[in-house]
Image (spheres, rainbow, N blue to C red):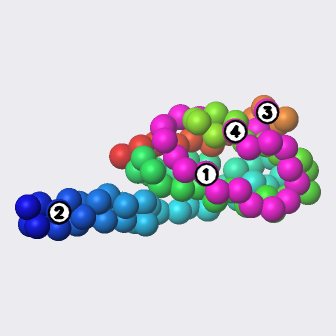
Amino acid sequence: MRKLIVLAALVALAIAAIPAFAATKTVKVDDNVFSPKALTMKKGDKIKFVWVGDAPHNVKGAGINIGTRTSGTKTVTIRKAGTFVCTIHPGMTGKIRLR
């Protein structure tokens, strides 16, 4: 019984540690462009969006919903592949691929 409890505790610790291994990639939100425009990630990885331009932008799509802002940062956890856009600037798009 003692071995079973120890094993269960080790499994719980291993599962809890998994998010600590998630990678974080940075995307600059500049004037009318995301940089980089495409990312290849694993489910559970994070994207840190950093506003560097002067114009207001938002980020919508691929499970991301960040409201309009002109500065600062916002980090999101990636759950699915897809395209994200700034709805204010229709040509401003980015793509997430999952491996």
| Residue 48 shows in this picture | yes
Q: Earlier in the sequence, mark 3 or mark 1?
A: 1
- Percent position of residue 72, x then y: 81, 62
> What residue is at 20 percent from the left and 59 percent from the top?
8
Q: Are marks 2 and 4 in contact (CB under 8 Å)?
A: no
**Which mark, by number, is residue 76?**
1
Q: Is residue 55 left or right of residue 51?
A: right
Disc number lying in front (4 or 3) = 4
Disc number lying in front (2 or 3) = 2
Name which residue type carries label 4. Asn
**Which mark, by number, is residue 87?**
3
Secondary structure of the residue carrying numbered label 1: strand
**Which mark, by number, is residue 5?**
2
Name which residue type carries label 1. Val
Compare residues 2 and 56 and report the one nearer the observer. Answer: 2
Q: Is residue 60 magenta?
A: no
Q: Earlier in the sequence, mark 2 or mark 1?
A: 2
Quarter of the figure with residue 1: bottom left
Q: Earlier in the sequence, mark 2 or mark 4?
A: 2
Name which residue type carries label 3. Thr
Q: Earlier in the sequence, mark 2 or mark 3?
A: 2
Secondary structure of the residue carrying numbered label 2: helix
In the image, which residues are magenta? Answer: 65-87
Q: Which residue is under mark 4?
A: 65
